[in-house]
Amino acid sequence: MRLLDQLVEERAELSETVDGILTRAADEARDLSEAEDKNLADLKARADALDVRIADLRDVQVKALEAAKIRAEVAATDEPEARAAAGVVQVNSEPVTYHERGDHSFFADLVASQSRNDIAARQRLERHMQEVEVENRDGTTAGVSGLVPPAYLIDAAVAKAQAGRPTANAVRNLPLTESGMTVNLSRVTTSSSAAIQQENGAVSETTVDDTLMTADVVTIAGMQDFSAQALARGIGVDQLLIEDLTMSYATALDSNIINGDGTGGASTGILNAAGTGSVTYTDASPSGAETWQQVVKAISTVQSSKFLSPDVVVMHPRRAAFIAGSLDSSNRPLMQPVVATASNVLGTGELSYGAPTMSIAGLPVVTDSNIPTNLGTGTDEDAIIVMRSDDVILWEENGGSPLVVQYDSVGSGTLTVRIVAYGYSAFLVRDPNSVAVITGTGLNATL
């Protein structure tokens, strides 16, 4: 984490501490104590110093970004005479190096720069990475051993690849650290105690204890072999290649955080995390109304153990369709596509893959085909996840976009070029009390 980020985070924590002190005094209907007054004064002094330092660093950062943008715009102009008029440098608004209507192909330049040592292609790739670093201000792309594909390719692919990572988008997303193969978190397992204190009696005391939680960094990768001719002279190859690799990458990442068993380089996914809440739904002839009851039980399970409410439900599309298609005894739908107006409605919204446009018991529902459908003794059951997403964390590099590298030597005898897309991520259920999983015969293949 950069210095500016650290200072901003510290400033936010100071504000939260101040709010906590003032709120506590207000809740107890009392004035601040002498110790609290002293603490507030110290916090204010530190906050004032941080504000000045943050403003200075922010000013430096803005100026550096503006300078980098100007350098990129000047370098992107191919006609020197257009940049100079009467001996004065003129900077125009130029498009990024690789864009949808551009003259140059990202992958064609990738091949040309390595196989033919094309200097102009290499310069365009270097300029593109400078543009990426200016855009991605968190610095996670610096020093990587691969290239970040152009934004217009990723944006187009992600629009189609979102179906591959609905759950990954629903959990808490954080940037992955720039180095190391593990992410460490501390979780309090024994809290402080408080009890009624009799006059001159001992004050309740329990030593706070914590446990170290570790999330291993996982590598997800995919590759395609293309002919050098297709990459160099093909039309639309960039779009096809990035779309295919990004969709596969997103799906593999999403499946890992749901189903990973913690072996073979995989994370420990939600369905295999230790200590999560469990709701067993046993019924050979399930119904939508009964399924809704199990979701409510799972919500209660999280509330009873976490003392906070879950905020999302994840289920397979077939389970969402089963609930949405359920009828009451008068053949009235138990789900309404608009705001509920009938007394028998258990949810609202419409079926939409990946996007939370449907709600059950007041919680948004995310549908995800990476939820397995071969669970249980009959290998025909799926599962429903009810969770508080803030405690389910996914760390990703470069905002979740895979990096791209090219290898010529693999198929040099046939002019075959291997394109590899890969990325690093880490995943952890920080607090298993924040998750409840519904399983059982009531979630069998009813559709």
Image (spheres, rainbow, N blue to C red):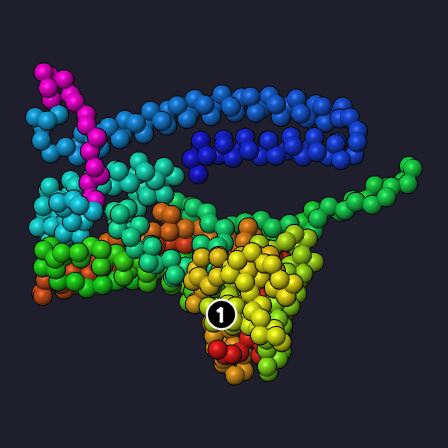
Say whether residue 285 is left or right of residue 172.
right
Quadrant housing residue 328: bottom right
Q: Main secondary structure of the magenta part?
A: loop
| Residue that lies at the very extreme toward the top in this rendered image | 86
Of 258 and 407, which appears nearest the observer? 258
In the displayed structure image, the side of residue 65 where residue 196 appears, left or right: right
Q: Position of residue 31 (x, y in %)?
A: 78, 26
- Please rate how many residues cluster around mark 1, counting C-alpha atoms within 10 Å: few if below 14, some from 14 to 19, many from 20: some
Pick the front one: 234 or 274: 234
- Residue at 60% over, 59% down: 341
Pick out the residue farthest to the right: 199
Q: Which quadrant of the view contains residue 345?
A: bottom right
Residue 28 visible in the snapshot: yes
- The residue that appears at 60% across and 31% down in the rendered structure is 15
Q: Please state which of residues 374 and 190 is positioned toward the viewer in this rendering.
A: 374
* Type of amino acid at the residue the image marks with label 1: Ala
Q: Which quadrant would the N terminus be assigned to in this image?
A: top left
- Specify whether residue 388 is painted magenta: no
In magenta stretch: residue 94: yes
Q: Quadrant of residue 62?
A: top left
Relative to residue 252, is residue 39 depicted above or below?
A: above
Count up the numbered dots.
1
In the image, 198 versus 161, the foreground residue is 161
Q: Residue at x 52, y 58 (%)?
A: 338
Task: From the image, tell me which residue sits under label 1.
Answer: 321
Q: Residue at x 58, y 74 (%)?
A: 331
* Element under disc 1: helix
Q: Is residue 333 found left or right of 56 in the rendered image? A: right
* Residue 213 appears in view: no
Residue segment shown in magenta: 84-99
Rendering coords of residue 165 (x, y %): 41, 59
Query: Could you tell me residue 173's position as x and y percent?
Result: 46, 49
